[in-house]
Image (cartoon, rainbow, N blue to C red):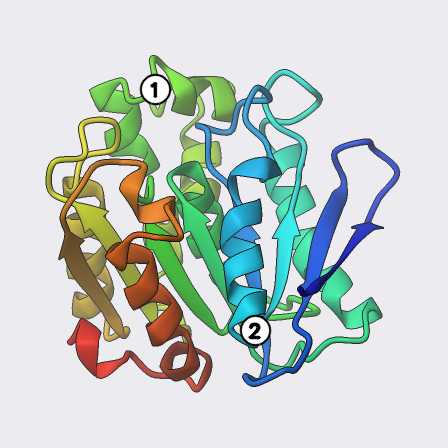
Amino acid sequence: MSEVRTIRYGGDRSQYGELHLPRRREHPGTVVIIHGGFWRARYGCDLGGPLAADLASHGFTAWNIEYRRVGNGGGWPATVDDVGAAIDHLAELDVDSSRVAAVGHSAGGHLAAWAAGRTNARVPVTAVVAQAGVLDPAAADRAGLGSGAVAAFLGGTSDEVPDRYRAADPLHALPIAAPVLCVHARADDIVPISQSEAYVAAATRAGGAAALRVVPGDHFTVIDPSDESWTLVRKALPDLCAGHLPVLAR
């Protein structure tokens, strides 16, 4: 079994991560797991634990992070501040932070893509996997995804707080240097596949490296470590960490 260490990156009870260390490291870099749950406090990093454990069992170092969410001190900008701080904390740990892939599901997909667009980050995100990601916050708000989750996260609608939407929008950061693999089920009725389609189209137009893999299943199939949609992510990570899209995603 891999070793798991719980490590704090801040003083709040939600500012910690679970570092999964493989018995034998077979892949360079570190994979950051960012859970979803529409940025709400009732969802936690237990959602990402099985994925981190699976990665460690296949020779990856994985950092499954928790962060403040809406309802326990999070929202804008605390949530994104925490995600940035958790990733930057890798510089303090005995891990390879030269290559960092951020893998995020749903709202975590948004946070992963947002993190890759940071400027002057202490630990840059060099690759992204967005699993059913909320990648266009304004469109998600207009569609009412998560019963108003985006407005709750950003403190208003896109008409009320446009500057926050612009700062939080991964589309606004394009192009980014990191390759981005979106994995989405066409039958997803929680976050529509149009979110991934719009992001990949915009990233490609901007000259970035982005691809969409459409998979069977629903919103949660993509975070089932026994499902083929997760297997393709794990197999794609070495290429992504090397700075390019894998052949399977082209």
Residue 27 image point, x, y percent:
54, 83
Reading the image, the residue beneath label 1 is 146
Residue 88 image point, x, y percent:
71, 62
Residue 200 image point, x, y percent:
20, 59
Identity of the residue drawn at 41% across and 20% down: 149
Observer-nearest of 85 and 22: 22
Name the side, left or right, on which 81 lies relative to 214.
right
Quadrant of the image occupied by residue 217: top left
Residue 232, labelled with which disc? none
Q: Residue furthest right?
A: 11
> Considering only order in the chain, which callout, 1 or 2, is on the residue closer to the N terminus?
2
**As shown in the figure, which amino acid type bears the numbered disc 2?**
Phe
Q: Is residue 118 visible?
A: no
Tag nearer the camera, 2 or 1 = 2
Quadrant (top left/top right/bottom left/bottom right) for the N terminus: bottom right
Q: Residue furthest top?
A: 147
Quadrant (top left/top right/bottom left/bottom right) for the C terminus: bottom left
**As shown in the figure, which amino acid type bears the numbered disc 1?**
Gly
Quadrant of the image occupied by residue 53: bottom right
